[in-house]
């Protein structure tokens, strides 16, 4: 008999068909919003779970699901996993890196440009029938080409954004990261390492691509916003909680920075009500990796992690393989 797995959210039918070649699959193709108790109930008898960023895998759940051996996340970020608790329980965690890097970098740039050039604000104005005549300063925004781009979080996606800025738009690229990149990678990205403070003070456009953790919580709060130039823009494609959304809404309303582009939010899918009422912010519903090709590749990679680990004893992109192996 085939091993049993749970697919916790609705996913491509082709992904289900692929998984069914190897497993007995229970899947949430109705995309119901399961409570934790329901998720635990569905996981009984399952050795693997296909998860998305929305399922919290913690010590309580793991204790209630002793047969579980792997959770494969269809996301590069995995702050929905308590990895220490998973390691302690001998449960492998996998994520879906690399296949989304360039697509997500594209979207970071899309949001940067929409924000700097006031694309959404001006579109709303036009749709509202307010465009009566040309005006010299109508929706005059911030320059993108030749400006200074500051990237906080210089992983693969951050590097992709740096290359787009440096080589596509002649931007002066500075970055801040937990550790400085090696000289060859810096040269490849044409990016210079600076302190977070210098970055915030000098960048015309700040883009956040740092993974969420207790240490990166509110990387940008009132104090950091106060360092930025009043003409600067801020883009968050990382995770909700990296930015203090209430502080950002206040800074936008008071014109302490020019504009922001946000794809992720604290407590999403809820959005801080103050962000919904300020005009100089572009808001998108966590879609940075959302192209058909990339979401297909992410689903396949998550599925291949389940097949790799449960059938061939080797996951493709494990997070805690060494910890689980030593259990
Ligand atoms: C999306 O946010 C991801 O982590 O892949
Ligand atoms: C994050 O993991 C990234 O690839 O930037």
Image: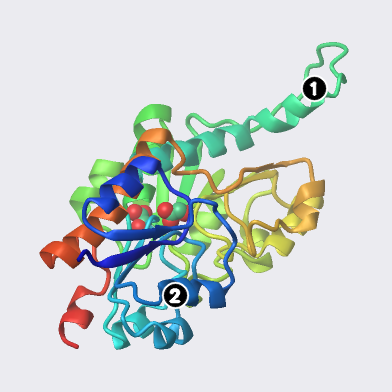
Vertical relation: 219 (above or below) 253: below
Quadrant of the picture in which ligand 2 is shown: bottom left
The image position of residue 326, as x and y in percent, is: 16, 86
Residue 86 is left or right of residue 129, and the answer is: left
The image position of residue 142, as x and y in percent, is: 63, 33
Vertical relation: 236 (above or below) 138: below
Q: Which mark is residue 270?
A: none
The N terminus is located in which quarter?
bottom left
Per the image, label 1 sits on a secondary structure element best described as helix
Q: Residue 127 carries which label?
A: 1
- Graded by Cα atoms within 10 Å as few (under 14), some (14 to 19) or many (20 or more), the crowding at tag 2 reads many
Which of the marked residues, 1 or 2, is nearer the chain's N terminus? 2
Vertical relation: 235 (above or below) 95: above
Per the image, label 2 sits on a secondary structure element best described as loop
Residue holding disc 2 = 57
The image position of residue 20, as x and y in percent, is: 28, 52
The residue sitting at 78% across, 41% down in the picture is 279
Q: Quadrant of residue 87?
A: bottom left
Q: How is the image coloured?
A: rainbow
The C terminus is located in which quarter?
bottom left
Residue 98 is left or right of residue 225, and the answer is: left
Judge whether residue 275 can be spotted in this image: yes
The image position of residue 223, as x and y in percent, is: 65, 68
Asked if marks 1 and 2 touch (Cβ < 8 Å), the reply is no
- Graded by Cα atoms within 10 Å as few (under 14), some (14 to 19) or many (20 or more), the crowding at tag 1 reads few
From the viewer's side, name the closer residue of 97 and 20.
20
């Amino acid at each position: 008999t085939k091993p049993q797995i749970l697919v916790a959210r609705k996913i491509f039918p082709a992904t289900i068909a692929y998984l069914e070649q190897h497993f007995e699959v229970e899947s949430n193709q109705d995309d119901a919003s399961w409570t934790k108790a329901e998720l635990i109930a569905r996981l009984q008898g399952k050795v693997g779970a296909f998860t998305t960023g929305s399922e919290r895998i913690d010590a309580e759940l793991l204790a209630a699901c002793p047969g579980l051996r792997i959770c494969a996340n269809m996301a590069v970020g995995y702050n929905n996993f308590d990895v220490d608790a998973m390691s302690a329980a001998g449960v492998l965690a996998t994520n879906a890196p690399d296949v989304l890097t360039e697509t997500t970098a594209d979207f970071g740039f899309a949001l940067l440009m929409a924000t700097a050039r006031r694309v959404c604000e001006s579109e709303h104005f036009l749709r509202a029938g307010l465009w009566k005549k040309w005006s010299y300063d109508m929706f005059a925004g911030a320059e993108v080409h030749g400006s200074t781009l500051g990237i906080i979080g210089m992983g693969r996606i951050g590097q992709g954004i740096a290359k787009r800025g440096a080589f596509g738009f002649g931007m002066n690229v500075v970055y801040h990261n937990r550790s400085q990149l090696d000289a060859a990678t810096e040269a490849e990205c044409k990016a210079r390492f600076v302190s977070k403070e210098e970055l915030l003070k000098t960048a015309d456009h700040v883009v956040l691509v740092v993974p969420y953790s207790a240490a990166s919580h509110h990387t940008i709060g009132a104090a950091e916003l106060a360092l930025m130039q009043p003409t600067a823009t801020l883009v968050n494609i990382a995770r909700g909680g990296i930015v203090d959304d209430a502080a950002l809404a206040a800074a936008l309303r008071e014109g302490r920075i020019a504009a922001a582009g946000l794809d992720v939010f604290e407590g999403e899918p809820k959005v801080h009500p103050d962000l919904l009422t300020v005009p100089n912010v572009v808001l998108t519903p966590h879609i940075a990796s959302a192209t058909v090709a990339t979401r297909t590749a992410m689903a396949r990679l998550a599925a291949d992690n389940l097949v790799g680990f449960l059938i061939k004893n080797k996951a493709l992109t494990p997070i805690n393989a060494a910890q689980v192996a030593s259990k």
